[in-house]
Structures are given as C-alpha cells and as structure tokens.
Image: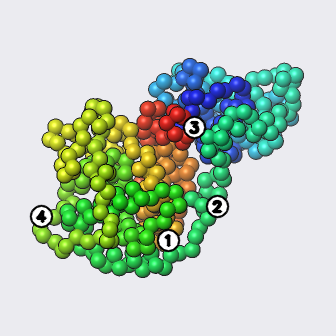
Amino acid sequence: MTAPQHLTITGPEDILGYVPHSLGYWPSRSLVAMTMQGKRLGATLRVDLPEGASSRHGLEDFSRTVAQYLLADDDANGTLLMFFTDDEWTDASGPPGGRELLADLETALGLAGMPVRDAWYVGAEYWRNVYCTDTGCCPLPGRPLAEIRDSRLNAEMVYLGSSVGAPPGDGPAGGPEPEENPAVLAAEQRWTETLCGKSASRPQFERVLDTWESALAAKSGTTQLPHEVAGFLRATLCVPSWRDAVLVMAAAGRPAAVAGAEEFGIFSALPGPPATAPAGMEAPAATARPSIQPAGAAEPGSSPVPDNGEVPANQEVPGYGEVLLGLTPLVPDWTRMKSLEDAMLQLAHCGPGEAQAAAWTAKAWIEWCRGRGSYAHASLGRALEAAPGYRLAELLSEVVRRGTICGWAARREAAWQKFGTDAA
C-alpha cells in the first residue's frame, strides 16, 4: 500500500505512527522498509527479521532480497528503515546484531539506487534513531513509545477511520469464528446435487455469474446473504472453473470471466439440463455487463461492452492468468473486490469443507492483490486447514512464500488505497 498524499509528516514519530496503520497491525520482530519518492513516502514493505544467529552470508542475502522487493517501486530514490524488535538495548548501538544488518542493508539499497535516508529501532518500550549519538535529543535507551501512539499523524489516521488490529494469525482471521450455519450447509448440499453434471453448461455458467453479481451488488459490510443464496454460492465455489471466473469477474469484469472460460474450452457444445439458480438473483442491470480496461487500452469507459455482454472484435480481453497475477486491467475494481471479500468471509464462516477452503483462498488472493502478504499467508493457512492439499491455496502459498508482488500492488496508480481516493 502507498502512503496518503495529503498527510503531512512533521517528525519521525509521524512516520513510525503511520506504519501500524499501513500494515493494519503493530509489527513485531520485523523490518519495515518504506520507499521515498523525493520527499514523498512510497510503498511499505514488512519482512521478518533474520534470526539472531544468521551468518554473514545470510544477512547479505536477506538485504539483497529486501532491495529486490523495493525495486517494484519504479519511482523510489530513497528508503526509510524501521527495526521493530522485542530485544532491548542499553546504548546507542541498538539491539544485538542491529548494526551488522543495517550495514548490509545500506550497501544493498545504495547499489539499488535507493540509499537509506534514515532508520530507527523500535522496541517494546522505547524507540531511537539509529544514527543519532547525541544523548541530548536521543536519550538512552530511547524515547517512550507513547510519543508514537500520541503523534499528530496517528490521530489523523484514526480520524480517517483507520484502526490498528491484531497481527495476522492472532485469533480467527476476519473476526470471531461463528458457529456453523446448518441452514446454509443444507442448502449447499441440495445445490451441489442440483448442479452436478452442469459444470460444462454455458447457460448454467451464466446463471452462476448472474447470482454472484447480484450477491456482490447487495453485499457490503455486515449484510447477510440469504441462506439459500449462501448455500448456492458455496456449492459453486467447489467447481474450479466457476470459482476462478468469479475472481476474474470481480477484478476485471464479466466479459473477461466469460472470454477466459471460452478460451479454456470448458463449455460443452451438447445441450444439457436446464440452468437453475436461487429465485430473484438475476444480475443487476447496471452492473451486468461492465466494460473492461486491458493494459494499453483507451481510458476507462471509452469502449463500453454492449448490453448483450459480447466483446467487440477489436477489443482485447485479458486472460485469467493476467488478471490473477494483477497484470491487467490497468486498475482492478477494488470496490467490487471488497464486496467479494465480505461475501467470502461470510461463506467461510458458514461451515467446513472445500467451499470453506475456496472462500479463504479467495480472501487470501484479494489480500495478496492489496500487497498484504502477511494477511494472505494467514488466510491461506486457514484454507489448508479446511482442506489439506487444496490446490489453489498451495499454488498461492508458493507465490507468497517467494515474495512475488502482485502487479497492481507494484504500481502506485493501480495499488489498493486503504483510505480511499484521497489517500494515494
């Protein structure tokens, strides 16, 4: 996530106070690096600090990896470093091993064209500037953390509606775990039997997308899906081609979802059983056929898709792989993806099984698209608990483990904005 442009930084307390809001939690045993674009804050990266016994070679590799991640910010020309550690210190050298790691990071980031402009140690009770040796302005062991929590910028972030929660993995992701919903699970079973044998049906595919579009148009925050609809949606998540189409549709529009399914050849030319879906869940007219905006195309809205959903022959439609990796469209539909996340959380909490694994994996993908790898990792853990070996969760886990950054998260103009359009 990138920093809000309209916030004014007046001192290090403001920078350090912004970090927990950027991440969504107060980091522990973490290196937080923020790129600088001139005098403006850029992207935020959090990685686990290397183990205290790391070798000289290990610290160098770690530092080069951090620099490689930050190179995703093409406009970066400097870096700020924050070492959040549980280890305390008694002198200006900071926590054990801090100076050695800092030296390697300075070298790696300098060679990458993003020299370290400033750095701080943040402990359990105190914080201090890494480079300051004047005990007049930087008393030992440091300044109290209350200065960060009481900073002006922290107050402004709270005013904007930001909050700092528990770290990913501390307690149930997405809030307290509710009890299973027997009514939804019964509906899921009925719909699983009804939809059996229809995965290659083009009419059924369209009804699935209609229902998801209608559900997403109505879903926000705490709005509860009707039991019958929730059961239907959970059943559709157990068909991989439908599950993938829903993810693509949320980010890139329905034409991309349909065209990708056609490209994969999932539809049968033979007539099948009649398509079916919960009553009253037709796609809303205003959003049934959104336009798409592949990379390199004209401005959004300049080439709309006709109401019949057919894509003009001269308009390129992004493939599933390009969308799922965040390479296209230029900017995804973040509002629709938030609605999808809300729906997936509700479906995940209805009960166990493959549908729960699919819902947690979808949430993980959305978090990865936002550039929040820690949250994605936590949701993937829940997915693999629900269905060990779930293929999409395993694939995305490998992507997250390697530190691969989603294409949208790597570009300021496309990146998710936690605080709205004024917080670029």
Residue type pointed to by label 3? Leu
Asked if marks 3 and 2 touch (Cβ < 8 Å), the reply is: no
The image's colour scheme reads: rainbow
Res. 5 image quadrant = top right
Residue type pointed to by label 1? Cys
Q: For residue 350, which numbered disc appears in the image?
A: 1
Indicate which label's residue lies in the foreground, 2 or 1: 1
Q: Earlier in the sequence, mark 2 or mark 1?
A: 2
Q: Is residue 49 visible?
A: no
Which residue sits at x=27%, y=50%?
289
Q: Which residue is mark 2?
A: 171
Q: For residue 269, which numbered disc appears in the image?
A: 4
Q: Position of residue 405 (x, y in %)?
A: 46, 40
Q: Position of residue 420 (x, y in %)?
A: 52, 39
Q: Earlier in the sequence, mark 2 or mark 4?
A: 2
Indicate which label's residue lies in the foreground, 4 or 3: 4
Q: Is residue 201 above or below residue 291?
A: below
Q: Residues within 10 Å of mark 4 (few under 14, many from 20)?
A: few
Indicate which label's residue lies in the foreground, 3 or 1: 1
Q: Residues within 10 Å of mark 3 (few under 14, many from 20)?
A: many
Res. 326 image quadrant = top left
Q: Earlier in the sequence, mark 1 or mark 4?
A: 4
- Measure the C-alpha gap from mark 3 to mark 2: 23 Å
Q: Residues within 10 Å of mark 2 (few under 14, many from 20)?
A: few
- Measure the C-alpha gap from mark 3 to mark 1: 33 Å
- Measure the C-alpha gap from mark 2 to mark 4: 48 Å
Indicate which label's residue lies in the foreground, 1 or 4: 1
- Measure the C-alpha gap from mark 4 to mark 3: 48 Å
Q: Residues within 10 Å of mark 1 (few under 14, many from 20)?
A: many
Q: Which residue is mark 3?
A: 45
What kind of element bears circle 3?
Answer: strand
Q: Earlier in the sequence, mark 3 or mark 1?
A: 3
